[in-house]
C-alpha cells in the first residue's frame, strides 16, 4: 500500500518534471543551436589566432629591442653621469677583477719588495701586500656607502686621537695609498697625461679604512 | 607562409568540428539541455549552459582517446559545467542582498507553468538535495540516463547510483508531501 502511495507520489513528480522540460524545450532554440555554436567556435578561433600572432609577431621583437635600448641608455648614463668616487671605485674593482688574484698579487709584490731590497740595500722600498689587501676589502664598503647616500664622508668622530708618531704614520700611509692608486690604477693615464689626483673624499675614505678598518 | 598555416589551422578546426565524434556528441544536445535544466532550473540559463558544454567539448575533444566513451565523457563535461554554474550562482546570491536579475519574461502560458506552485516546490526540493544525490537525480530524471551511464559519468558503481537515486527520490517526495500537508 505504502509502495503504491510512494509510486503515485513519484509519478506526480515525474509529470512535473516532464512539464518543466516541455516548457523549457519551447524556449530552447534547437534549430539554430549548431549554427550558433559554430559561430562561437569561429569567434574563439579568431581570438586565439590574434593571440598567437601577438606572441609570434613583431610586438615581442619590438619589446625586446626597446628593452635593449633602455638597458643601453641606463648603462651609458651610469658611465657618463656617475660620480667621480663611483668611477674610482669601479676602477679599483675592475682592477681587482682583472688581477690574477689577490694572493698572487701580494706574492708578486712581496717578491718585488725583496728584490728591491737586495739590489739597493738601505733604500726605502715599499711593501704593498697588506695595503692592497685592505683596499681590496674596503671596496664593497665604499660602494655600499655610495648607494646608501653617505658617500665617503670623513667622520672625525670615529677617528681616534693620534700622537705625533701616529700622525706621521698616517701621512706615510696616505702617501702609500696615493702611490698605490697612481701606480696601479692610472698607470696608462700617468704615462700619457701625467699623474692624476684622486678626489679628496675618495682618498680620505680609503685612508679611514686603512686606519680604522 | 603565414597564409598557408592559417588555412591549415582552419582545415584542422573544420576537421575537428566535422569529426564523427563531435557529430555524435551533438546528437546528445537535448539530453545535455535537460541535464542543464535540472541543475540551473532556468531554460535560458540551460540553453547557455548547453552551448558552454559543447564549446568545452570542442576544445577538449582531441584529448578524448576512446570515442566509444564519448557519451559518458560529454555528460561528465555537462555535469562539471553545471556544478560550476551552480557554485557561481550561489556565490552571486551571497553577495547580492536583493537579486537584481530580471525574471525571465516568457509568454503568458509558459509563465503560468513556471510559476506553478508545485513546480516551484519541486525545484526547491531538488536544489536542497545533497550534491551527490542531486547529481544522480538530475542525470536520471532530467537527462534520462541509464544507471550504467550515470555510473560511468560519475565514476561510481551502479549500486551506488541506485541507492543515491532512491535517497534523492525519497527526499524530494517528503518535501512535496510536507507542503501538501501544510496546505491541507
Image (spheres, coloured by chain):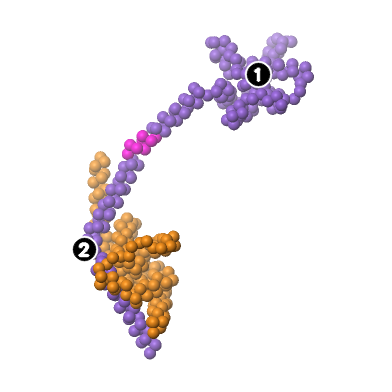
* Palette colour of chain B: orange
Main secondary structure type of the part rendered in magenta: helix
- Is mark 1 in CB contact (under 8 Å) with mark 2? no
| Residue at the disc numbered 2 | A31
Chain of residue at mark 2: A
Image-based side of B29 in relation to B100, left or right: left
Label 1 neighbour load within 10 Å: few <14, some 14-19, many 20+? many
Asked if B125 appears above or below A82 in the picture, the reply is below
Same subunit, labels 1 and 2: the answer reads yes
Residue B145 horizontal/vertical position (percent): 32, 72
- Residue drawn at (39%, 63%) of the image: B99
Residue at the spot of label 1: A177
Q: Which residues are magenta?
A: A57-64
Q: Quadrant of residue A167?
A: top right
Q: Secondary structure at mark 1?
A: helix
User: Which chain corresponds to the colour purple?
Assistant: A
Amino acid at each position: 500500500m505504502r509502495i503504491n502511495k510512494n509510486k503515485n507520489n513519484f509519478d506526480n513528480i515525474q509529470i512535473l518534471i516532464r512539464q518543466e522540460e516541455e516548457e523549457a524545450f519551447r524556449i530552447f532554440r534547437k534549430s539554430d543551436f549548431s549554427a550558433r555554436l559554430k559561430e562561437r567556435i569561429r569567434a574563439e578561433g579568431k581570438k586565439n589566432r590574434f593571440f598567437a600572432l601577438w606572441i609570434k609577431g613583431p610586438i615581442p621583437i619590438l619589446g625586446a629591442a626597446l628593452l635593449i635600448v633602455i638597458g643601453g641608455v641606463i648603462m651609458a648614463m651610469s658611465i657618463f653621469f656617475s660620480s667621480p668616487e663611483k668611477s674610482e671605485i669601479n676602477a679599483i674593482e675592475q682592477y681587482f677583477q682583472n688581477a690574477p688574484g689577490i694572493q698572487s698579487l701580494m706574492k708578486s709584490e712581496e717578491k718585488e719588495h725583496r728584490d728591491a731590497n737586495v739590489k739597493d740595500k738601505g733604500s726605502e722600498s715599499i711593501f704593498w701586500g697588506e695595503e692592497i689587501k685592505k683596499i681590496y676589502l674596503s671596496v664593497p664598503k665604499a660602494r655600499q656607502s655610495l648607494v646608501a647616500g653617505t658617500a665617503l664622508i670623513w667622520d672625525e668622530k670615529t677617528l681616534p686621537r693620534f700622537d705625533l708618531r701616529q700622525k706621521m704614520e698616517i701621512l706615510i700611509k696616505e702617501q702609500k695609498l696615493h702611490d698605490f692608486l697612481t701606480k696601479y690604477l692610472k698607470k696608462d693615464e700617468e704615462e700619457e697625461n701625467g699623474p692624476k689626483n684622486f678626489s679628496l673624499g675618495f682618498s680620505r675614505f680609503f685612508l679611514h679604512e686603512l686606519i680604522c678598518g | 607562409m603565414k597564409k598557408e598555416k592559417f588555412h591549415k589551422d582552419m582545415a584542422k578546426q573544420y576537421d575537428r568540428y566535422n569529426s564523427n565524434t563531435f557529430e555524435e556528441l551533438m546528437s546528445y544536445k537535448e539530453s545535455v539541455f535537460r541535464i542543464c535544466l535540472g541543475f540551473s532550473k532556468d531554460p535560458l540559463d540551460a540553453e547557455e549552459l548547453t552551448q558552454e558544454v559543447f564549446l568545452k567539448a570542442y576544445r577538449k575533444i582531441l584529448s578524448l582517446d576512446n570515442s566509444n566513451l564519448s557519451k559518458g565523457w560529454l555528460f561528465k563535461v555537462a555535469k562539471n559545467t553545471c556544478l560550476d554554474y551552480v557554485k557561481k550562482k550561489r556565490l552571486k546570491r551571497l553577495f547580492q542582498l536583493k537579486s537584481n536579475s530580471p525574471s525571465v519574461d516568457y509568454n503568458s502560458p509558459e509563465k503560468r507553468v513556471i510559476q506553478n506552485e508545485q513546480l516551484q516546490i519541486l525545484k526547491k526540493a531538488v536544489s536542497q538535495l545533497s550534491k551527490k544525490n542531486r547529481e544522480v537525480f538530475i542525470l536520471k530524471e532530467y537527462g534520462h540516463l541509464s544507471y550504467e551511464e550515470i555510473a560511468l559519468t560519475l565514476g561510481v558503481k551502479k549500486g551506488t547510483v541506485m541507492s543515491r537515486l532512491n535517497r534523492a527520490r525519497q527526499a524530494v517526495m517528503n518535501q512535496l508531501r510536507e507542503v501538501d500537508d501544510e496546505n491541507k
